[in-house]
Every structure is written in C-alpha cells, then in structure tokens.
Amino acid sequence: MTTELDALVIGAGFAGMYQLYSLRDRLGLNVKAVEAGAGVGGTWYWNRYPGARCDSESHVYWYTFSEELMKEWEWSERYPGQAEIMRYLNFAADKLDLKKDIQFNTRVTSARYDEASKRWHVSTEGGETFVAKFLVTAVGCLSTANVPKFPGLESFKGDWYHTGQWPHEGVDFTGKRVGMIGTGSTGIQAAPVIAAQAKHLTVFQRTANYSVPARNVPLDPAFKQYVKDHAREIRATTHETLNGMGFKIEDRKAVDTPPEEREKIYEAAWERGGLQFRASFQDMLISKEANDTAADFVKRKIRSIVKDPKTAALLSDIDHPYAAKRPPIDTDYFETYNRANVSLVDVKSKPIQRISETGIVTEDAEYSVDIIVFATGFDAMTGPLQRLNIVGRGGVALKDVWSEGPRNYLGLQVAGFPNLFTVTGPGSPSVLCNMPVAIEQHVDWISACIGHMRTKGLETIEARPESVDKWVAEVNELAHKTLLPMATHSWYLGANIPGKPRVFMPYAGGMVRYRETCDAVAAKGYEGFALA
Ligand code: NAP
C-alpha cells in the first residue's frame, strides 16, 4: 500500500506529536505520523523500568505552545513519574485529536529520496510505503537501546531486560537475585526500587557516577495554583535560561567564593535537590578548578552516606568532572548500598567477560543471578537516525555521510538530504536542554520554514555543504570551551558504543544563543540553505 502525503513525521513522542499538530492544524498539510510503539509517548512509552522519572521539574516538563493545555493539566509531583507523563501525553494527544493521524505499530525500515519526483519514499516493516514531500524525524535522542555484546547472553537461563525496552506488564523481582549492569541516570533511579523488592541486588559498576538527591515531593495546592497563574512567566523563564530549565544559573564564580561560603551554598543546593545543583556557580562547567570544588563536595557526601568504607570508596572514585557526563539525580541511591541485600561489584578493574547460564562472569568471579537488568544506555543521538536507513540525493546513505560523526547544519538538516528535518538532531542543544523546550523550538522553526516555502512556492530546502562545515566546527569549538569533553567515556561523545566515532554531538552553546542563531538564519531568508 502506498500513501501520498505532504509530510510524514516519524515518531509520536513529545516531538512527533507537536510536529504533527503544527503541520496539520496550523499549516493545513496532509500529514501523518508513524510510530513503532502501540501508543504515544516515545521515550516514556519504552522506558518503564522501576523508578523511571523525569529529572526536569514537572512545571517545565510539558508543552507550552498552548496556554489552554497548561491550564487544564495539573502535575502531582515535583518530578513527574513515567506513568504520569504517559497520562499527560495521552491527554495532550486526545485534546489535540492527534491519534487519528498516527499510525501505531509501524516501524520505519528505510527512507529514500527520489530526485526525479522530489519526494521521500519511506518503507515500513509491514511493507507499506509513504511518499511525502517533507520528512521530519522525531525519533528521540535516546531510543536505540545498547545491549553490550557479552558472549553467552543467549545461553542465560534466567530473564534479562534492557531498561529502554521494559515489558509493559512489569517485572516481579520478589525473591529474585538481580544483577544490574550500569550506573547512569537509569541505573541510579532503578537500583533503590529493585533493591526494595528483590532478594538480592548486585550492581555492576564500570564508571562511578555523581548523583544529587532529587528530593521529589507531592506538589501542594498553592504551588499548583501558582503554576496555573504564572504559565506565561514560567514559559518565558525557560526561554531565557541556558538549558531551558525553570531556574537560572547563578552569576557568582566558585573560584571567587571563600571556601566556607561555597560549602554553605553547596549544602543548601544539596538540600534543595535536583539539577539546580549545577547552577550553583556559573564557572562550574568551564573551570576545572571550580568544578573540583563541586566534585569534592559530592564525593564527600557519598562517603558520608555509604557505611561500608570499601563500597563508599568505589562509589566515590569518580574520574570525570561533575556534570561533564549527564548528572543524575536520585531518590536514596547511595543509601541503597547500606541495605543488607545490595552489593556493588567493580567491573572497571575486573571487566565483565561473559554471561553464563546462571549469571555474570567477571575476570575473577561468577555472580549467580535470576534476572539481569541492562541499564547500559543507548546508541545516542545518531543511533535512532541511522537505524532508519536514510538515503539522500545520488543514492548516498546517511551512514556514509556520518561515518566519522554527525555532520549537519543547525542540527536540523544534512547536506544532500533535501526536505529532511531532524527534530533535536545531533548538533542542536537537545539533550543538554530541557527536552520539551528544545523540541518546541525545533518544531516551531521547521513549521515556519515549511510555511515559508509554501508561501513562496518553493519545492526544496537543503543545507549547503559549506554551512555544514561551519556548523560542525562551531559545535566542536563550543563543546571544547566547556569541561564536557573531559568525560571521555560519555555518550555525548559516542564513547559508550564500541567503534562509534568520538565526536561531541550536542550543541553546547546554550538554548538562548541557539534560538537566536536559528531565528537569525530564518530572518535572513534561510541563510546557509539552498532553496529551490
Ligand atoms: P548511560 O548514562 O549511558 O549509562 C549506562 C551505564 O551502563 C554506564 O554506567 C556504563 O558505564 C554502563 N555500561 C555500558 N556498557 C557497559 C559494559 N559493557 N560493561 C559495564 N558497564 C557498562 O545510560 P542511561 O543511564 O540509560 O542514561 C542515558 C541518558 O538517558 C541519561 O544520561 C539521561 O540523559 C537520560 N535519562 C534521563 C532520566 C531522567 O530524566 N530522569 C532517567 C534516565 C535516563 P560507563 O559509564 O563506563 O560507560
């Protein structure tokens, strides 16, 4: 079956839903979305692991393009949990009447640009074809699960799960010995919840990680009313802050603050909890000396919480600057290691070698488990795009154009791939920003661009190769003005996937500057793009 469209959107998470709405209801296009899952939700549809919760605060983690939506919805907790976010996204999808134009259970297997007809031909696993003038990918940055290729996994007699492909019916850990690999944001959220249920939890840690308490609480009626009354101001704040959050980064510098005062500031931030911790000082991510003060504070906290000195030493032996990897926030993560049924295994000094029929085998021991949880992250940013098998003009594949790392303009378009837009693609702030803010900015820009083309009777838009060269250099330069590339094993750099090129992928110049750049490009008649 072939369906002809003005535009096809791939994905029905936060990004795909808003993109569908914008193109359909604002521009009046004939548009559909396809979605691999059986429902809306994207990241939150798949990541149902125990403890899954957002680390943006709820009052900034939603759509802000419609004041009506903001006023009708009420979050119940400081940080929304996975189930509540799913309820929210279903509420939004129903309110905007989106589901009728989303084809669920539909995985895209390839997308090929036909130069003669100037149309994208998109094929699905079910054998369907969509032919569309515009193709917008809204596939998320963290949607391609990474299950390390440990030999023997297929022989494991127990059950195993990746956190990003969690069974919808849940997993019962009661009476089970659980091995969890990975201590990123996901593992740090999951460990306390699994430990509370399982007979025993063994956490396999390769790289020790920082974490700050989230201090999640139910929201009181006064705050809920405040959010309703100040919807506009809250939105404005998220447009003024570096990372689209609802809090501002302090002007003061850690290096200029006397040690006792600095300690008090960190202590207050620790008590307040959440990602605001990294906003305590403006130099935290640009000066190693400043960062060391934060790193030292968190490491001391870890050692004061964890009672067993050996475990405490392993957990606080962190080799990268604070927040150079995505900083997790937690609920009782370090406290969990004080439970009698939890143990920590260092797989940095003694790496996992294989999976046996009964458990996890490291260089010096075998750990028998009934269930293995892979909290091992994702082939981030480029992975979700590469698995679409995109082929542009002249039969050139995206995987070849990006063989040495992502190359695009504004994170939005790749030279040689006309009328293809990548929402929150590499080279845009995306994962360094509160995602809904990054998403709304991209969708608004893409929709305005398509609107402009229609008004002017233009057929195609394509990033110019020289704009790509300049943009890639700028993304790289901005990253290296920060401490971010110092976390050499981070997924920001692609370092978590064996063989993946090491290129710092997100745009580190901040959301405000990025938005201004995109707006200026549009105001100058889409400078740097070829329009025909
Ligand atoms: P991640 O940050 O990439 O962490 C993966 C973990 O698995 C790391 O500890 C990694 O160790 C370990 N690992 C991977 N391969 C391994 C191997 N072969 N042997 C041993 N250990 C291995 O993934 P994630 O925790 O799923 O988080 C990814 C991102 O999702 C986060 O950074 C965040 O942006 C997002 N997220 C957000 C939330 C939230 O909003 N609350 C929650 C969860 C996730 P190494 O560090 O040594 O590679």
Image: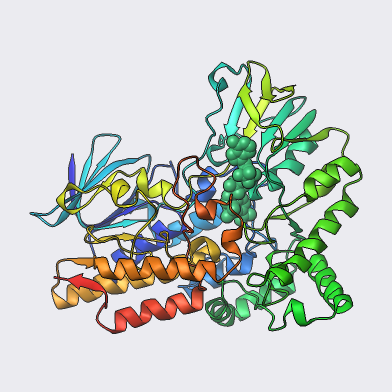
Residue sitting nearer the eye, 257 or 449: 257
Note whether 259 is above or below 114 in the view shown. below
Q: Is residue 46 left or right of residue 368?
A: left
Residue 406 picture quarter: bottom left
The answer to whether residue 22 shows anywhere in this view is yes
Extreme residue in the left direction? 116
Note whether 340 is above or below 15 in the view shown. above
Residue sitting nearer the eye, 471 or 143: 471
Residue 88 picture quarter: bottom right
Q: Is residue 34 left or right of residue 154?
A: left
Can you give x and y, in whole percent of width and height, for residue 150 in the image? 56, 27
Residue sitting nearer the eye, 111 or 489: 489
User: Can you say which quadrant of the picture contains the N terminus?
Assistant: top left
Residue 192 picture quarter: top right
Can you give x and y, in whole percent of width and height, for residue 363 in the image? 69, 25
The answer to whether residue 63 shows anywhere in this view is no
Residue at image position (57%, 77%) is 241
Can you give x and y, in whole percent of width and height, for residue 344 in the image? 78, 36
